[in-house]
Image (spheres, rainbow, N blue to C red):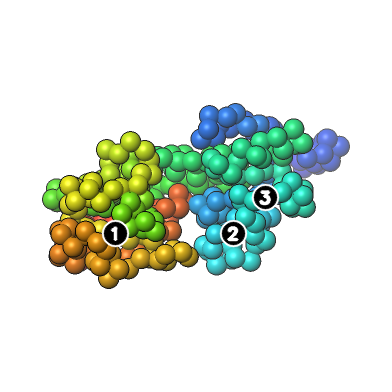
Amino acid sequence: MRRRLILLFGIVLLLWGPAEAAPLTVVDDAGRSVTLDGPPKRIMTLTPGNTEILFALGAEDRIVTVDQWSDVPPAAKAKPRVAPFNLSVEQIVRFSPDLILSTYGSAEPLLPLERQGIRVMIFAPRTLDDIYRNILLMGRIVDAEARAESLVRAMRQRVTAVVAKVGDAPKPKVFIEFDGSDPGRPFTAGPGSFIDVLIGLAGGVNVAAHSRTTWPQFSLEELISADPDLIILSDALAPLHPQTPELVAQRPGWSGLRAVRRGTIVAIDANVISRPGPRIVEGLELLARLLHPDRFR
């Protein structure tokens, strides 16, 4: 009797065919509701952070193209590459994506494509919780929810471990430089950026935390007034005007800064703290070690 029921069930499945994927409606970081017919099969990712998330979720086979800066993991370099701010409709059509992952700035010109069935999602996280949310959301989109949950759980555990180590430590003042092309007004990370959040979690005080914009240009006068204990150069590998501790120490007006006098100027790879993806925890751990080396021996 049991064998007959199993056989009958199999026949029913063959007659009905495989069930179609149910539509999925999600909300992106711009507050837009985006409805997908099912898990996307051809994804165009236009930011390195989104590329790293998809690889971490095992969805790299769905990526048809990446942005020109996506270089982690190494396999990402083998994907076709595009310049996200110079995309043409012809390029997009050639790759035939059913989903484009973008961010503010590069996304707006792409939105009309939704009338042709190409969905566009905007990811612009401002906090670690936003990054966690986006990883979980992408897990739902590519049908890798369990893997996304495991990844976020591991990230949270590492963050908790860092916070526990530096929680009662003194909080040095930190200035992170992102673009020192104009040494009199270098760009830095201000309020509303996840980098500002990272500095706080790492046990430091961001001297630009009270700036009026998220990515302010910090004047020399402001820097002298703040007098940071540590200057971190994330523009050491910049393609134009790369900076080094030696160059910074020679800037006019900078010699009186505490960090310059003490030699506490450090160059790092900006990608580890500026890409909102799985490696952001590595960025937090790096900052914490720079701020509190005695807690990580």
Judging depth in this view, the residue of 274 and 253 nearest the camera is 253
User: What secondary structure is marked by label 1?
Assistant: strand
Q: CA distance from mark 2 to mark 1?
A: 25 Å
Instruction: Give above or below for 266 relative to 152.
Output: below
Relative image position of residue 59 (x, y in whole percent): 61, 53
Relative image position of residue 91 (x, y in whole percent): 74, 52
Residue denoted by label 3: 87
Residue denoted by label 2: 68
Q: Of label 3 and label 2, which has the lower sequence position?
A: 2
Q: Of label 1 and label 3, which has the lower sequence position?
A: 3
Relative image position of residue 38 (x, y in whole percent): 69, 38
Judging depth in this view, the residue of 270 and 238 nearest the camera is 238
User: Which quarter of the picture shows residue 279?
Assistant: bottom left
- Please indicate whether residue 3 sits to the left or right of residue 35 in the image: right
User: Hey, which residue is sitting farthest right in the picture?
Assistant: 15
Q: Of label 2 and label 1, which has the lower sequence position?
A: 2
Q: Residue at x 21, y 58 (%)?
A: 253
The reply to whether residue 180 is in sight is yes
Quarter holding the C terminus is bottom left
Residue denoted by label 1: 232
Q: Residue at x 66, y 31 (%)?
A: 35
Q: Which is closer to the viewer, label 3 or label 2?
A: 3
Judging depth in this view, the residue of 78 and 132 nearest the camera is 78
User: What secondary structure is marked by label 3?
Assistant: loop
Q: Are marks 2 and 1 in contact (CB under 8 Å)?
A: no
Relative image position of residue 167 (x, y in whole percent): 18, 47
Three-letter code for the amino acid on which mark 3 is drawn = Leu
Q: Residue at x 14, y 48 (%)?
A: 168
Q: Residue at x 61, y 51 (%)?
A: 84
Q: CA distance from mark 1 to mark 3?
A: 33 Å
